[in-house]
Amino acid sequence: MFEIYERMFELKQGVRYVLEFYGELKSLIDESEMHQPVVTDAATLTGYHQDLAVSKFLSGLSPTL
């Protein structure tokens, strides 16, 4: 999941059309959903949010660490 989140965080529109940018983002979202199915359990959802927060933190660290 970390690698998927990292690609999401790094994704920018750049010179692409909005539709192309959205398509790539949607592909990453779909890929992440394959690993984390939709749930209604509050504890599981909290775990997903914590995973996302940790992934964002790790992706923002200096590569020299």
Image (cartoon, grey):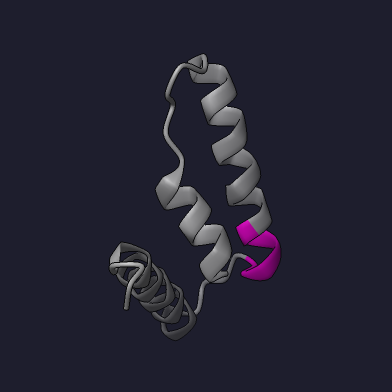
Q: Is residue 49 left or right of residue 26?
A: left
Q: Is residue 33 magenta?
A: yes
* Number of numbered discs: 0
Residue 49, given in percent of the width and then of the height, sits at: 38, 71
Task: Please name whichever residue, 4 or 32, is drawn nearer the observer in this view of the structure.
Answer: 4
The residue positioned farthest toward the right in the image shown: 34
Q: Is residue 19 magenta?
A: no
The structure residue drawn at horizontal position 61% and vertical position 30%, both measured from the top left corner, is: 23
Rendered image quadrant of residue 37: bottom right
Residue 62, given in percent of the width and then of the height, sits at: 28, 67
The structure residue drawn at horizontal position 51% and vertical position 18%, both measured from the top left corner, is: 16
Quarter of the image where the N terminus is located? bottom right
Task: Please name whichever residue, 1 or 38, is drawn nearer the observer in this view of the structure.
Answer: 1
Q: What is the span of residues highlighted in magenta in the rendered image? A: 32-37
For the stretch drawn in magenta, the main secondary structure is helix
The residue positioned farthest toward the front in the image shown: 64
Residue 40, given in percent of the width and then of the height, sits at: 52, 72
